[in-house]
Amino acid sequence: MSEKDACRRTRVKWLTAAMLVVSLTPVAAQEQPPGERPADLSALSLEELSRLRIDSVYAASQHSQKVTDAPSSITIVTADDIRRFGYRTLADVLRSVRGFYITNDRNYSYLGVRGFSRPGDYNARVLLLVDGHRLNDNIFGAALIGTEFPMDVDLIDRVEIIRGPSSSLYGSSAFFAVINVITRHADSLNGVEIQSSLASFGSPKVRASYGRRFAAGSALLLSATRYTSQGERELYFSEFDSPATNQGIVRNADADEYSQVFGRFVAGHFTIQGLHGSRRKVIPTASFETVFGDPRSDTIERQSYVDVQYERTIAAGWTLSPRAFVDQYAYDGDYVYDYSGGGTPLLVVNKDFARGNWWGTELKLTRTFASRHTVALGAEYRNNFRQDQYNYDDEPYQSYLDDHRSSTNWGVYVQDEITLRPNLLLNLGLRHDSYDTFGATTNPRAGLIYHPREKSTIKVLYGQAFRAPNAYELYWHQQDVSKANPLLRPERNKTAELVFEQYVGGHLRFAATGFHYRTNGLISQDTDPADALLVYRNLESIRATGLELEAEGQWARGWRTRVGHTFERTRDQATGLTLSNSPAHLTKAVLLAPIAHDRLSAGLELQQVSARRTLTGHVVPGVMLPNLTLFWDGVPRPVTLSATIYNLFNASYADPGSEEHRQDALRQYGRTFRIDLTVRFRR
Amino acid sequence: MLPDRTAKRGSTLRRVAAALCAIAIVCASPVVRAEPSPEYLIKAAYLYNFAMFVDWPADAFSTRTSPFVIGILGANRFDRALERTVADKRIDRRPIVVRRVDSPRDLRHCHIVFVSSSDAARSAEVLDRLDGLPILVVGETSDFARRGGTIAFLIEDNRVRFEVNLDAARRAKLTISAKLLSLAKTVRTG
């Protein structure tokens, strides 16, 4: 056989593989009537087989299924993507997917989903799970995704991003999206792994991980990470450009540091998992009218949990999985104020903090009946035995808030995935939740998933979601400033979505998704005319309509590209205006170019956000940000090396500020870099 | 200030969505047969590779030309992908036959047994019954190899990988090639 023939043969093999796998609904050769000609992957070598991607998702229906069969619009980001595109945080992962964007206020990262990014919501309208464990806390309902996310992204095996409402399975917070982070298996380490990276502004990160499967079959994974960053040495805010505030210049007040530990032990049917993360960020923006440039203003977030899970298939084909967990969340904010009112400064540290503790238990049963029904039944109970909020001045001591609460809630759900015909699936789900704060709510979801042809998928989806008012919105109050509102109702969202996916020529995929959201009773802060106090109320009704288009290609030898565009329009029913921080256009593009097979690759990423309105009605211009990563895998040597440049052309851009900022818009980082070295010591 | 054209654009978008819907429905043809998922296409190809990269003792076959038998226990998620994968292929001149098996008792004449996750509850019984016989027992639950199965499929990083239990292979008098072992996610002894 000539070299050319061999080459062609390899190409044919790869195209066959790409056709079969990329298309997800694998196909017989085109000219043949279906079922006549064998379609298989037997021509592939073992190495090639081990490299093929299968796109399956767990959290959409709480059982493993093909992405094209799930009742949602889904994106999967894998560990390989995280390495080859240089993602540093979960926020980096999320900003790379269609319809999502990130706003950073130099303290927290806020996730925008399809045009919704409400000021100060700490991502409470997105459910964040780690291996199915809910991370949203019981004070703010926050989903922390930046450096404040309590887990190292390099311990992630994959992230499932499920758009649309999923309250029919998960209850509160599964409002705009569910993000399920799946952690790496102990086997993927099989020894010790040391990672060290260095980034702009003197930002080293060190991670040490150990994974081992023991002879008895139990498996252990332990990992610890430490990251410190000086942040930008000098920042300038024109809003503070006066002699009293150092001409708007703030120095050495952008530091960021975190420490994290993660562990998992699997023995028999039991899995015990726990994590602890602590992050401290100095606030350079003088938010909440604090003293400009005082580096003592900072916030510390600490989050930890222990989760025990049991899973086994019991008689009659039922899979039984109970789970129990204990969680802790602590927030400590130091805010430096000047009480002098001009003249000699009188600096006082105001301590704002919250303590949340909860435990809970879940029980889930799944079974497939006669290959036609896949049924999931579940129940969940949560006991928030501590939801405390405090606020006081340090010296001289004065307390403003000392609020102690506890609450419970429970939910039951049922879901049935019915195979009506071989090419037609009906997914029905319903969940009932009961809270001792506002009462009960029931939320359905229905999805009809149709494969009219081998390479086409049409999904017609409808779902309702709710978000329970959180302890902060219900109870935070301060004399003469704000008052509590224990009568808050849950927010509601009704979503209709139409998804169309088409595979062309085997290696190309096109997807179009149209969506319409009707959200009512969104909780926001308002002034009560009766007493002029700030109070949270169920106020806003918002309509959002949008269209997402995406094209994806995979070719032989690892070439990969994905281009997606989201058009969206949001409208506040009361004012008739587009929401603040709601871009009309979002573009995402990635290109992975193998330079030397899997060993050396270049990953180029482009993220475009169009102009956004700020809270004061001004506009921050749109921006296009390219990131470039070179990734080298030293196989068979156990070393990987990567180098990334973020914001390649040093574009100057800003994100809209929030109510607590005097700045209307906050300038973001210019060009930054990171280099990363990971070494494995296999047993 | 952004001019407010929300209402108008909203209805345009709705129209585009409706048009897409119409196109989708026009494209639609009534019926198509069920297809196995990529996961099972890949697993089918792996099973064929296992047959090639493992050596069975001569007494595992009654004659020189008797077929190589792959048995599937439990729900057949391969649909017909496994049959298609091995059709017209041979292992040492032996044709390959795929059999659905309902009872662990009928497994003795197989060379590879695939235990579907739907039958994971019976895997202890199956492994017990097949212990010491020259049969490559392949499962797809995470603890399958640890519990004495020869090979277990794992899903990792959205890819299908596998784990090998060398002790189980030794007891079954199977010789696993170094190539197969080198691609295993983990190789355990015991």
Image: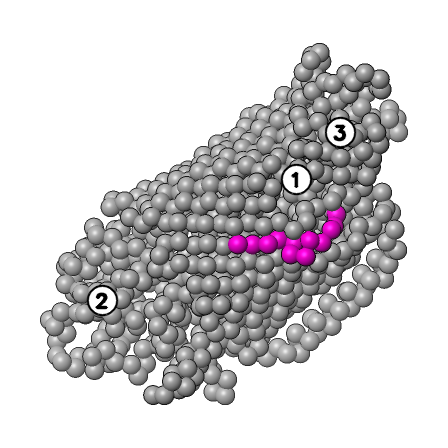
- Residue interval drawn in magenta: A643-654
Discs 2, 3: same chain: no
Q: Quadrant of the N terminus of chain A?
A: bottom left
Question: Which residue in the protein does label 2 denote?
Answer: B177
Q: CA distance from mark 3 to mark 1?
A: 16 Å
* Vertical position of residue A383 compared to residue A2: above or below: above
Is A647 colored magenta in this rendering?
Answer: yes
Q: Could you tell me residue A61's position as x and y percent? A: 52, 54
Which quadrant of the structure image shows residue A545?
bottom right
Question: Local crowd at mark 2 within 10 Å, few (<14), some, or many (≥20)?
Answer: few
Question: Mark 1 is on which residue type?
Answer: Glu
User: Which SS class for mark 3?
Assistant: loop
Residue at image location 62% in from the left, 53% down from the top: A646
User: Which SS class for mark 2?
Assistant: loop
Question: Mark 2 is on which residue type?
Answer: Ser
Letter of the chain that mark 1 sits on in the rendering: A
Q: Could you tell me residue A295's position as x and y percent? A: 67, 28
Question: Mark 3 is on which residue type?
Answer: Phe
Specify whether A622 is left or right of A218: right
Verify CB contact (< 8 Å) between mark 2 and mark 1.
Answer: no
Q: CA distance from mark 2 to mark 1?
A: 56 Å
Residue at image location 64% in from the left, 56% down from the top: A648
Residue at image location 83% in from the left, 35% down from the top: A241
Q: Which mark is residue A232?
A: 1
Which quadrant of the structure image shows residue A585?
bottom right
Discs 2, 1: same chain: no
Letter of the chain that mark 2 sits on in the rendering: B
Question: Which residue in the protein does label 3 denote?
Answer: A292
